[in-house]
Amino acid sequence: MNNVLSRNESMLLDVSFDDPNTEMLNQVLSVQRKAFQKEPYPSIQQRKDKLKRLRTAVVEHQYKLTAAMSDDYQGRSQTESRLTDILGTVLEINHAISKLRKWMKPEKRQTELLFFSNSSWVEYQPKGVVGVIAPWNFPIFLSLGPLIAALAAGNRVMIKMSEFTPATTTAFRACLADVFSEDEVAVFGGPVEASKAFSALPFDHLIFTGSTTVGRQVMKAAADNLVPVTLELGGKSPAIVSRSAKLKDAAAKITHGKSLNCGQVCISPDYALVPEESLDSFIEEVKTYYRSMYPDMAVNSLDYSCIITERHTDRILGLLEDAKQEGARVISCDGPHQGKRIPLNLVIGLTDKMKLSKEEIFGPILIVETYKNIDDVIQYIVDRPRPLAMYYFGHDSAESKKIRRYTHAGGMVINDWAWHVMQSDLPFGGVGESGMGSYHGVEGFRSLSHGKSVFKEQRLFPIGLFHPPYGNIVQKLSLGLYLGYKKH
């Protein structure tokens, strides 16, 4: 696409995208806002065209994007990246294109009987410029999900990528530069300081995906400009194994949930709750399935991803060592770690003193807890911060319903994990400490649109009967009908 910015603006942007300062970020925001003001309501064809261009670019650049992610991790499964970051994105784009006409259509609303013959509706108007702060764990999927919703809603977008994914940022910017100019979509890299400056910009909406701790900081920064925020955070997501479940199947799917991207998934199961009599069998099933996925040892497998950084690797190993020191039983499913590849470890005997009980794990550690009855499970979950996801394995419909009704989570999957995120018609978001707001599907479209209320009064409607002087018969009848005729 041709750059629509002035020559001086383009020269500034070209040298600053990977290390943007506040001045440069504000300049891009200004450019996008001016472009939006010239075209405040893109047509359905314009929006579909942008989504189709995005889909074409992502498909054409898919191998460059997955290779870049692998470079940033120093070893990340490219097939896994295509399944999650690329396929998930294409499904989301397809859904948005197919539903856009319905989403954009004004929604008729009921008019009060007092105003009979008039009409009311809601029409969805683009907000303007949307900011997106993306994490490192699924840098493409978690950048493009908000981008798809923003483009469908008719907005311009600025994206801040993680400082831990410089190669992905470069590849992603090149991908989008094929189809968008900077006044439509702009992508930035840069250190933590750049993220702080980005979160303080006066966007029309800001979407952040990351930790709860950083989410609080982002919300504080956005509050200075009264910027509405969508926060997709994390938390400790439980996996409940019912006595009605097929233990082998539940263990296999939970094991996959802790192994994909080496457990660096915001909706990965943090802990499994299993019947006390099934503990040993569950442990063996997990170990068996883990080894079947990586028959030549996970630490040597190209299908098994590395931990993102040395610091995060040390943190995961530190959590395991702390658990051992505090008396937990720690079981490796596949021998010792090698470099930044840590095999899945099971931790049994968690106590409140252990760091694992307080921190989101974000790595290949599965806490295994036992229970006597399902009421204890429910109490255990509600006593803790509300998680981003919850997983129930079992075939007891009454039990499943009770868990759904008496616990809270951002989303829930029955008899598997995480696949609700790939369902484009379902909203994705957290609750409580795991986030606020949601995107994907119509919820994403509406989150990034302003639902403008419109009331249209017919030409001959006698609204003057409700004006002073008060006391006419219409006023008395109306007040009496709704408020009663009793005199004070």
Image (cartoon, rainbow, N blue to C red):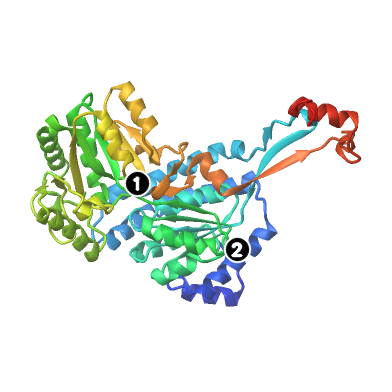
Q: Compared to 94, does 170 lie above or below?
A: below
Q: What is the x, y in percent for residue 457?
A: 82, 37
Could one spot residue 83 in this view of the protein? yes
Which picture quadrant has residue 29? bottom right
Q: Which mark is residue 30?
A: none
The label shown at residue 32 is: 2
Across the whole image, how many numbered discs are drawn on residues?
A: 2
Circle 1 residues within 10 Å: few <14, some 14–19, many ≥20: some
Label 2 Cα neighbours within 10 Å, binned few <14 / some 14-19 / many ≥20: many
Q: Nearer the viewer, residue 243 or 184?
A: 243
Q: Secondary structure at mark 1?
A: loop
Kind of residue at badge 2? Gln
465 vs 223, left or right, is: right
Q: CA distance from mark 2 to mark 1?
A: 38 Å
Q: Quadrant of the C terminus?
A: top right
**Residue nearest the observer in this picture, 125 or 357:** 357
The percent coordinates of residue 137 (x first, y second) are: 33, 55
Taking the spot 28% from the left edge, 52% from the top edge, the residue there is 360
Instruction: Estimate the x, y position of residue 347 in percent, counting from the top left.
Output: 15, 47
In this figure, which residue is indicated by the disc labeled 1?
385
Of labels 2 and 1, earlier in sequence is 2
Residue at image position (65%, 50%) is 42
Q: Secondary structure at mark 2?
A: helix
User: In percent of the image, x 27 and y 54: which residue is there?
Assistant: 359
Image quarter of the N terminus: bottom right
| Amino acid of disc 1 | Pro
Q: Is residue 45 left or right of residue 291?
A: right
Locate residue 256, reporting x and y percent: 23, 41
Q: Are marks 2 and 1 in contact (CB under 8 Å)?
A: no
Residue 4 in sight in this render: no
User: In the depicted view, which residue is nearer to us: 420 or 461?
Assistant: 461
